[in-house]
Image (tube, rainbow, N blue to C red):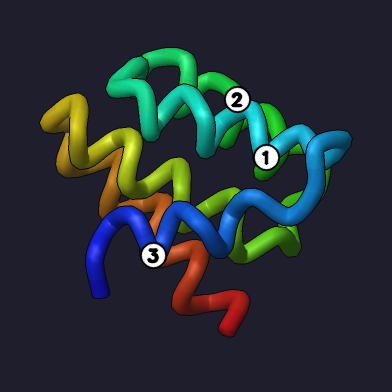
Amino acid sequence: MSHALLLAAFAVSADDPLTKAAEAYRKGDHAAAREAAAAVAKADPKRVDAHALLGLACLAQRDNAAAAEAFTAVLKLE
């Protein structure tokens, strides 16, 4: 699956706070994407999509440990 298709799944609606994270990721602002996705995941720990986007942003920043943590959260929630 391409990143474009995956990111399209994160853009639920304009008022969804994860949309801000997805837009930042699309624009290559991985730090902002990570911050926004982490905030959503913290506010609603059961949001699989927030943890998944957080993992992608961490990978883009080459923070493999944080990415693994985020993706582990996804697997635990699935």
Residue type pointed to by label 1: Leu
First-in-chain label (1 vs 2): 1
- Left of 61 or right of it: where is 5? right
Q: Are marks 3 and 1 in contact (CB under 8 Å)?
A: no
**Could you give the CA–CA distance between mark 1 and mark 2, rounded to whole angstroms?**
7 Å
First-in-chain label (3 vs 2): 3
Looking at the rendered structure, the secondary structure element under dot 1 is helix
Q: Position of residue 7 (x, y in %)?
A: 45, 53
Pointer 3: what residue? 5
Q: Position of residue 61 (x, y in %)?
A: 19, 26
| Dot 2 crowding, Cα within 10 Å, few <14, some 14–19, many 20+ | many
Q: Is residue 28 above or below residue 75?
A: above
Residue at coordinates 70% horizontally, 60% vertically from top-left? 47
Image quadrant where one finds the C terminus: bottom right
Name the mark nearer the viewer: 3 or 2: 3
Q: Which label number is shown at residue 36?
A: 2
Tell me where residue 40 sits by quadrant.
top right
Q: Position of residue 41 (x, y in %)?
A: 66, 43
Looking at the rendered structure, the secondary structure element under dot 3 is helix
Residue at coordinates 56% horizontally, 31% vertically from top-left? 21
Residue type pointed to by label 2: Ala
**Could you give the CA–CA distance between mark 3 and mark 2, rounded to whole angstroms?**
20 Å
Q: Which label number is shown at residue 18?
A: 1
| Dot 1 crowding, Cα within 10 Å, few <14, some 14–19, many 20+ | many
